[in-house]
Amino acid sequence: MIIKDTETLRKYLSVNGSVEIENIKPYLKKAERSFLKPLIGTAQIQVFCKTQTDPIIIQAQELAQEAIANFAYYIYLPIGAVQITDNGIHVVDNENTKTASDKQFKELQRSFKKSGHEALDELLEVMEQSADKFSEWFNSSNHTIYKELLVNTTTIFNKWFYIFNSRQTFVALKPNIQISEDRFIKPLINPELLNALKTKQTIPERQEVKTLLQKSIIAFTIMLTVDNGMFVLSAKGIHMRFDALPYENTVTNINLKVNDFLTRTKNNKKIEGEEYLKEALKTIEKNLDKFQEYTIKQTPKHIKLTNTKSILSV
């Protein structure tokens, strides 16, 4: 495990002196499996389990520990709040101690989860900036799936639509990024050119087209995402919805499907995606000598997305 003793656990949490790591060990394992493994893979977790000397790897290791400590307590709290015996489930409540209210309990649980996600975001940022020091992650399927995309980093997405620089929001958007690329871009510029543009470009015209296609993909991705209750969209940008407590009047995408702001955003992003795609095609067709992978085909004068039984297509 990344956290092996109570002393390390206490570095990241204010826990009662009587709490020992043995009480929470099963939840530390579960937190690693549920929150960390899908993002960085087993091999990188094993690296963080060992003593490190490189300052950057140590920084990442500590962020991983911070994330796991918070997520473990988030998972542990419902069990830790009760006593389970052969006689049933009990809560401690006497003249010296008083059970926390449901509101206090939920607020604390959310605080642990929020802190865990913040540590994870920072961890992924450190690893992205020094990928050469995290080869186990960089060469794993947990990372290489993003190399297959034209929009393959948080930085690119955040540049053209604000996602609060959140790596986790970017990861959560990945399915719609892939759908946007496959459905709207690939059929018009053909797979050969699309794959070629995923490598580093040095010719100005090819750089321009790559940027225009990235903007188009991002616009279409937001268009596909606005109705998804997993995300919260506002005038500032879009981010993942982690937790909303029952007593809060939290406004989210899922209960705003007919909201004017979301409707306008969806329509605007559809138009933006179409316009960026048209500009990319114009640049390609004006500079065919620089886009030899492109096959000239009959293309519509106006690229327009149609809606056929709720399935968007070109």
Image (cartoon, rainbow, N blue to C red):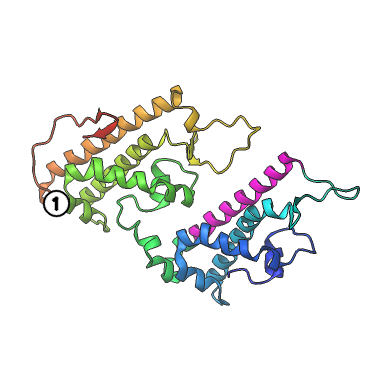
Question: Residue sitting at 34 percent across and 27 percent down?
Answer: 267
Asked if residue 213 lies left or right of residue 166, the reply is left
Question: Residue sitting at 37 percent across and 68 percent down?
Answer: 139
Any magenta on residue 122?
yes
Residue that extends furthest to the front in the rendered view of this protein: 87
User: Where is residue 295 shown, x and y percent of the image?
Assistant: 9, 47
The answer to whether one can see residue 211 in this image is yes
| Location of residue 56 with respect to 245 vertically, above or below | below
Q: Nearer the viewer, residue 38 or 63?
A: 38
| Location of residue 247 with respect to 202 vertically, above or below | above
Q: Which residues are magenta?
A: 101-126
Q: Main secondary structure of the magenta part?
A: helix
Quadrant of image for the C terminus? top left
User: Where is residue 169 shown, x and y percent of the image?
Assistant: 46, 47
Asked if residue 58 lies left or right of residue 107, the reply is left
Q: Secondary structure at mark 1?
A: helix
The answer to whether one can see residue 203 in this image is no
Quadrant of image for the N terminus? bottom right
Question: Residue sitting at 70 percent across and 59 percent down?
Answer: 13
Question: Residue sitting at 42 percent across and 70 percent down?
Answer: 136
Give the residue pinned by disc 1. Answer: 290
Residue type at the position of mark 1: Lys
